[in-house]
Each structure stands twice: as structure tokens, then as C-alpha cells.
Image (cartoon, rainbow, N blue to C red):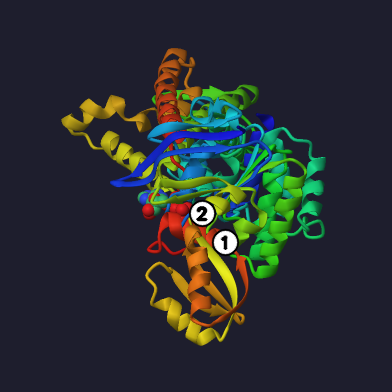
Amino acid sequence: MLGLIQNELLIIIGRWRSYIGFIGISILMPLILWGFSVGGEELHQDYAKELGGTFMVVGSIINSFLATYVIMNTLWIHIPFLVTLAAGDSVAADGANGIFRITLTRSVSRFKILVSKLLASYIYTATLLIFCAFWSLGIGSFVLGTGDLIVINNGILILDESQAWVRMAFSFSLAIFVMCMVATLCFMFSTMVSNAVGPIIGTMFLIIIGYMIIGIPLEIFEKIEPYVFVKYFNVWWDAFKDPIPWGEIGKKLGILGIYLVVCFGIATYVFLKKDIKS
Amino acid sequence: MILETKNLTKTFGLRKAVNALNLEIPNGSVYGFLGPNGSGKSTTIRMMTALISPDQGEVLINGQSVQKLGNKALLSVGALIERADFHKHLSGETNLKMLARMDGTDESRVQVVLNRTGLGERGKDKVKTYSQGMKQRLGIAQAILSNPKLLILDEPTNGLDPQGMKEVRDLVRELAAEGITIFISSHLLDEVQKICSHVAMISQGELKTAGPIEVLLKNSDLLVTEIHVDPIAPAIKLLSTQSWIHRCEEKNGLLNVGVSLDKISDLIQLLVQNNFQVSAVIPRTSLEDVFLSKVGEESQI
Ligand SMILES: Nc1ncnc2c1ncn2[C@@H]1O[C@H](COP(=O)(O)OP(=O)(O)OP(=O)(O)O)[C@@H](O)[C@H]1O
Ligand SMILES: [Mg+2]
């Protein structure tokens, strides 16, 4: 199994498309960090004004933690897109390129091949997010420094530096799980067609529709809202609440987990039954 | 039997691509699978190698059902189905290493099969720099990577020049000599006649005839004879008027005549009676004649 995963990673590494995400992040992040270091004073003033009544602010509240917190807030449409670039190709490309005629005629089971492909796209997904964290937290700490994280979100939460690191790690772990769910959805589409574009468009379409449904305050939409998986994407946000709402997080992860398992189940069914005709 | 199909049937839409096909491939044979374009060869082979599932029937490899066991039944099988496709941006060697990893085969086999297929020098180059012939040889390399006992090849010489075809044929002969059973589809009759011990012929998804080649040739009711006759042109004229003669033409200064076995003596008698000099009659039945008599003139290959 490890050998199979290694193979799939080799394929991902060999694909130019896999680097789009990393390149994109490497362009975006310095820009954002630069923005923070230049325009940080302004943000600091806004924050200080809001906090002024209750606290006395000493030093800057602009640091890599706050920057990361803000960045994570804004990238929720881009990251899924970058994730689908790898997951969409996963099964479809091998079909289209005729590779299945060589791999699926061997003694290794289709199920194992499918699982190794899925795990490889999870590894890709996790790497992409860790790369994000490397920029915003790692490089960010050099550029903006570290310190307490002050979050204003239905009240004020102040986390000292060591707590902030823990919460960041937790938040990124939750984000990786969310993105793995997105990858599984895209992966499912990938088993059904013979090109990568369909799965990417299909997944992004569902995510955007999902955001619309939870964004538009119509009663009919509110009824179906609980079934829209996008609604639970914000689980990473819960890592910055105090106390950490474990129950809430568990519920959200559970629902996303159900989606993930169902998508994987459908992918398995389709792939095991699939006639390789190309 | 190392490979068998039982009542194998596959329908695409309304068209029966393969219809109740029963084949028996004995251990150690080089088994040619002949049929015109669209007769169902690739579909059959894809069912043998678990790429598509039949509507009915099953494929047995060493008595194990491919349909029941899935890919596990393919443990001792190597296959090359139609064109050989690989990850183009990776080298031939890397591609084979990945496949060795899948099979659980030792990586040292990679260099062995590269050398064997004449790619030893080019293994490190990316597959996209390979010629069609090299890709096809890499295809055979991956098929023999894990020391299979049965090799299933679907038109392995397709797209190759005569030299490339000969190389593949020679390789197949060598592998057969090592005791590997080979099931090879083709629509090239003389290619099959050159290398195969057995042959099955299908047309429109149905089996027309099957067995050892010598037996088929011997039992063929259509025999081609080469006749040394003088003068040749009037002889053709004479024979063309006879309804029991299927074919009559000049080839390399000899008269080529297609007749059924029991009419040979009538043929000679007719020529002699008409004062032709008949100096030799050589029976030369080819697979082509067997094919035409079984599958029919309408399905030229
Ligand atoms: N994916 C498919 N969808 C629909 N029909 C198909 C499909 N694949 C094959 N067929 C049909 O099944 C029949 C058998 O095709 P197959 O490819 O098995 O023939 P073949 O003997 O391999 O031909 P060739 O010598 O051209 O390779 C043909 O009539 C073909 O049109
Ligand atoms: Mg074919």
C-alpha cells in the first residue's frame, strides 16, 4: 500500500498542474504579509479604538497570528480550488491517458489503487495547507513578529503566544480535514468522467452554490441549509473560541465526515464497476 | 487449460460485441486470436484482463474466475492491451519501477526487461521522447516485468514498421520458447501463421473455428495449390469457366488455384485433357484460405 501511495505521489509531483497552488500561495502570501507590515498601523488603530474602552493596548497587536487569522478568513474559496486541481486529475487522467490499461490489468485490486489515489490527494491537500501555514505563520513571524492573538468575534478573545500556537495548529488541522472532504467530493467526480475539468467545475459549482444558499436569507434556503456541507466549513473558526466548543466541533466534523464517507463510497462503487474502454 | 472463456458475452447498447464465446488455451501454446476489425477481439481480451465485466459467462485463468476473484486472478498474467501508454513525463525506467512496486516485484527486474526489449540504453529518457516502436517495446517490457506464465497481447505489432514487427515476433518466439503461454490477437494472418501453434477465429463476436494450426490446415476443405503449368494464360482462361474453382490467378510464374480437397484430381485431369503440361502440383494451404472459408469473403481482414 505504501508503494502504491508513493507511486501516486510521484505522479502528482510530475504534473505541472500540481504546482499552481504552491506558486499561487507563494505570490499571494508575500503580498498579504507586505500589506500587513505596511498597512498594519491603520488596522492597529481600528483595533485599539474598539478595545480602547476595555483594555490598554501596549505594543502592536499586528503579528503573524492575527495575519494568519485574517488570511484564513479570506481564502476559503481559493484553497478548495487549488485542492481540486490535484484531486480532479486523480482518477480521470489515468483513464484518459490509457494508464489504466496497464495498471488495472495487474494483480493489485482496484480498491487498493483507488484508496492509494485518495490518500495521495489527501497528502497533497495537507501539504498545500501546511505550505500556507509556513508562509503565514513561519515567514509571517519573521516579518510581523509574534505576540498575543487578539480576536474580536462576538466578544474579545485574547490568547497568549503559546496558546496561540496551539490554536493555530488546531485550526489548521481542522482546515485540512475540511479540505480533505472537498478533495473526496472532487475525487468522486473524477471516477465518473475522463477529464479533470469536469470534477473541478463540478466541485467548485457545488461549493459556490452552497455559499449562496447559506448566504441568501430565504426561508426555503434556510430549510435546506443544514444539508449544505459548505455550512460546516467554518469549523476551523471554532478553534479560536473560548472555551473551545468541542460539542459543536464534533458535530460539524461528524457531518463533514459523513459527506466524506458517502463520496468515497460512491467513488468506490463507480470505480469497481467501471468498464475500462479507452 | 491455462486460460478459458465460458459462454463469454458482452453487449454494447444493442450490438453484441462478443457472443457466447468459448475458448480453451492450452498451457504452453502460442495462441493466435484472429478476426476482422470490430469482431470483438479487444473486448474479449479486456474481459480476460478484468478491464470490463461481461454480461454473461466468465474467464478462468488456471481455473480461477477473473470475474469472481477480480485482479487477484491475474497474478501470473502479463498483458498489453492495444497501444502502450505510460506516464509520458516520467522515464521508461521510472514507469517500470512504479509498476514493479505495484506487483511487489523486485526492482532489479526493471533493468532486465529493459535490456530484453532493447531499451537498456534509453531507460532513463522520458517516455515522451520515445518512438512508437519503443513505446510498444516498453509495453511488452511491462507485460513481462513480473515473470508471468501467461502473456496476453492485443495486436502488439500495431503501428510498427516491418522491422519493428519482426522484433516483436522474435521476442514472442523467445518468450514462448521459455515456456510462457502466449495469447495474441491480430488481424495479420501471416503473422499469426508465422508464430502461433494454435488459432481461434472470430467474426462478429462469434467463434468460427479454433484449434492447432496444422489440424485446421489439414481439415480445411479449401485448398490452395501451386501448379507448374505451361502455357499459363490459357490455363487460367480454362479454369475460370469452372464453377468448382474458387480462385485462379498467376503468382510468380505459377498458377494459384483454390479448390476443395476432393477436386484436386479433377483439376489435374482437366488440365491434362486440354493438353497443358503439368509438371508439379504443390498444396499450399494458408491460414488466409482457412479464414476465408470460415469467416467468409465479405469480412476481409
Ligand atoms: N466502448 C464501446 N462502446 C460501444 N461499442 C463498442 C465499444 N467498444 C467496442 N465496441 C463495439 O464492439 C465491437 C467489437 O469491438 P472490438 O474493439 O472488441 O473489436 P476488435 O476485434 O478488437 O477490432 P480491431 O481489430 O479494430 O481492434 C465493435 O462492433 C465495436 O464497435
Ligand atoms: Mg482491437
Report the residue that reaches farthest toward the top: A247
Is A247 on the left or on the right of B276, as rendered?
left
Q: Which residue is identified by label 2?
A: B220
Q: Which residue is identified by label 1?
A: B285
Q: Amino acid at mark 2?
A: Ser
Rendered view: A64 above or below B221: above
Task: Out of A206 and A267, give the one closest to the viewer.
Answer: A267
Q: Residue at x 65, y 23 (%)?
A: A162
Q: Position of residue A81 (x, y in %)?
A: 46, 45
Subunit ID for the residue under disc 2: B
Q: Position of residue A177 (x, y in %)?
A: 51, 28
Subunit ID for the residue under disc 1: B
Q: Residue at x 66, y 42 (%)?
A: B29
Is A220 on the left or on the right of B115, as rendered?
left
Q: Position of residue A41 (x, y in %)?
A: 54, 45
Q: Are marks 2 and 1 on the same chain?
A: yes
Is B118 on the left or on the right of A11, as rendered?
right
Q: Amino acid at mark 1?
A: Thr
Report the residue that reaches farthest toward the left: A219
Which quadrant holds residue A214?
top left
Q: Residue at x 76, y 55 (%)?
A: B117
Could one spot residue B249 in this view of the protein? yes
Q: How many residues crowd mark 1 within 10 Å: few (<14), some (14–19), many (20+)?
A: some
In contact (CB < 8 Å): disc 2 and disc 1: yes
Report the residue that reaches farthest toward the front: B273
